[in-house]
Amino acid sequence: MLSRIAESLYWIGRSTERAEDTARLLDVHYHHLLEDRFADEPVVCAALLDAMGTEVTERPDADAVMRHLAFASTNPGSIVASLDTAWENARGAREALSSEMWEVLNTTHNTLANRAATTMPHEFFRQVRDRMAVLAGLADATLARDEGWRFLVLGRSVERIDMSARILVARIGSGRAAGWVTTLRCCSAYEAYLRTYRRSVDASSAAEFLLLDHLFPRSVMHALLTCERVLEELAPGGGRARVDDEARRRVGIARAELEFVRVDDLVDTLPGHLETVQRSVSEIHDAISKRYFLAERVVEWSA
Amino acid sequence: MGDLLNGYAPIAAFDELFASAETPRPHALALHDALQTLSPADFADRCAARDRAFRDQGITFQQSGEERPFPLDLVPRVIAADEWAVIERGVRQRVLALEAFLDDVYGAGRIITERVIPRRLVITSRHYHRQVAGIRPPRGVRVHVSGVDLVRDAHGQFRVLEDNLRVPSGISYVIENRRAMTRVFPELFASHRVCRVDAYPARLLDALRQTAPEGIVDPCVVVLTPGVHNAAYFEHSFLARQMGVELVEGSDLVCQDETLFMRTTGGLQRVDVVYRRVDDDYLDPLLFRPESIVGCAGLLHTARAGRVTIANAAGNGVADDKAVYPYVPEMIRFYLQEEPILANVETYRLGDPDVCAWVLTHLDQLVVKPVDGAGGYGIVIGPQADDRTLSDLGDAIRADPRGYVAQDPIALSTAPTFVGGAMEPRHLDLRPFAIHDGDDVWVAPGGLTRVALRKGSLVVNSSQGGGSKDTWVLADPDQDLGGSDAAPDDDPETRTSVRGASPAVCDPPAPGPFRGGAEQ
């Protein structure tokens, strides 16, 4: 498969996942602010911005956060910009997608961006999540499980590791211990959590669930496992004694570190773990690009 | 009962649907009757359905930097079987003659030494590239794909308006137009035997594989596109998908040791045939424009070494130069010893000082085109132009007579077109697409009918606000449908209708634990 196409699929995976996760994050926090009269709006907002890698200058309010993280086309991480990235990449890799998937991305791009300013926030987030769910479903139902599929899933899981970590970072930053339910809701994990632990939410189990659970698909651990599996499928082998794929090595190390975390003091060590995870994500990304995507620099032939 | 075509008033031109104000042409009678059952409001509903479908599928054309749904007029243009047979033979003949001409001017140059065509004319063509002289492509094919633009004059005779032998585009719209029409107007197809157009991608792939460099058993074919920002990107991607080959950009390719490779996730992979949709000028920065980043350095050299096929070949532009066009009938006589089946439009050769002087005094009665213009840019239609335009044009011609051709204006034929809620006559042309594989020239039955949506306009190019129509070639009653010899079993629709009945012996699906349809 062409490196350029593989890279496009990887970015479609990443940016659609980012759009979806950002929509989840904003939706839940926005409504949390409306409902919880003890919540400190500037603190929560600053935590959100900080978690998403935006510098916080003044005391931000909910509307500013919403504009910046959802609608701003100047912020490459915003929902609208992510959908744009996905669409741009799909346009150049149309023959590697099924036409059903392309249609979903195209209509999403055409309709959501225009409607962004006029729709109710919840309505908008809902639509983003729905469209992305449709897209994921169609990818699952219409793509052959070939290399292209693997790069799509790879992008998705790399982004999910990153975003799940960011969601946890936002939790820690906003201070109040009572917010863990909100965080679980961000990941659609609240019900799964209740079924798994069969007791009310406490910080330690919630963090454990979102960071370490092997079975829940939005946990950091699950995304790492997916990522590792896909990388292995892409480049099987590696010899008896070592793994010579840098990306796989990085994923493996990150996973192993989390596998053997002490759960007792998880709440205290969480910030450190999250930092490691986020650093790993950027290393994994670099290793993947270097191995699969690296195109030669454009050569100018003018005299 | 509807009244869609009531009040349709043909103008002074050949009308494709009506023989006179009231009487439809015999081969279009069934279409006329079917349309007449609708009212303008019904028709407008179908138009809305069409727009939705096109926009959702992203079937668009870039116009002034904006993506718009490709404007398809829902009234098809119908061509009778016997008329089509003439077009088919005429296009085949023309392509073969032009193919021979290219082989000649980049080889022995017989047509020049025998003084059929002036040497000056050939070597001053902006698209004559010395860089490719002496390259003899596999099986001698340079014009793998061509689009010969035809118009119909006031007497109903088809004439060739121009040849497109470089990177003619439009076939994807032919196929997508048909797909849209069968969805929006299924009942029309029930009453007609229309030749299918969707065999084109398979035919193209066959021709590309057949013209691969010698000795390659299973050639690797790619489509080369300038990228998503090209106006015809939709088509590039469409063809790549329909042929099941990679769509590559210049940066995906690299030439090493007289071999062309593409960069894949598994390393470099050899490429044997490039169906390129990049202009000559940008194809190879080593030989043409050095600043090009959409081509691949060394591509021409690799082709010269016979290690890769470039389709269409570089340098074809000399044969579709508008100043060379008047000589095509003579080429047909010279190379094929045949009389032209399709006539040219009367064209004045401005290289002759006397002719040029006459043309300059008659500009208000002529159509003048720049020789290397495309997309309808720069055309001046004398009878419709103001004095200022004409005097500027005169100066331009005096400064560069080689840069222009003059033609008699043709009253392009018209057909009913749905504009502003009613049927009105609009001018149209026809671009059939031909594929040459070295053995034969195959002409896709139909082609792109382009229609000038502005009232009275004679410029049909989509870059100038033109639309299109689905083009129906009616099947000869004795002939196999489709003009394709793809086995009917390859055709998914036939297959379902033949073997679609579900086997009666299967068990019904497992009902699950909630039997009896109780509400849960």
Image: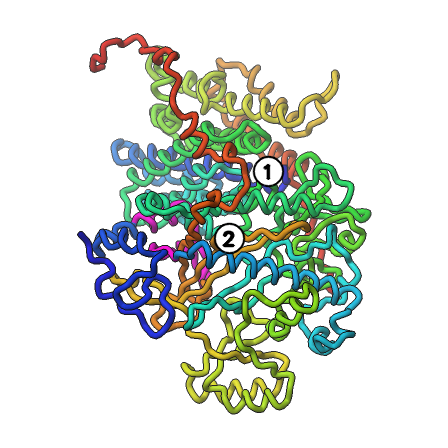
Q: Residues within 10 Å of mark 2 (few under 14, many from 20)?
A: many
What's the residue at 65%, 56% (across, down)?
Answer: B312
Label 2: chain letter: B
Q: Return the residue nearer the eye: B282 or A120.
A: B282
Q: Residue furthest left?
A: B1
Q: Which residue is mark 1?
A: A6
Q: Amino acid at mark 1?
A: Ala
Q: From the viewer's perspective, is residue A16 above or below residue B132?
A: above
Amino acid type at image mark 2: Ile
Tell me the quarter of the picture where residue B423 sits.
bottom left
* Mark 1 residue crowding within 10 angstroms, few (<14) / some (14–19) / many (20+): many
**What residue is shown at x 63% (from left), y 34% (from top)?**
A288
Q: Which residues are magenta?
A: B49-77
What secondary structure is found at the residue carrying circle 2?
A: helix
Displayed quadrant of residue B163: bottom right
Q: Is residue A119 visible?
A: yes
Residue on which the image places disc 2: B171
**Could you confirm whether marks 1 and 2 are on the same chain?**
no
Q: Is residue B75 magenta?
A: yes
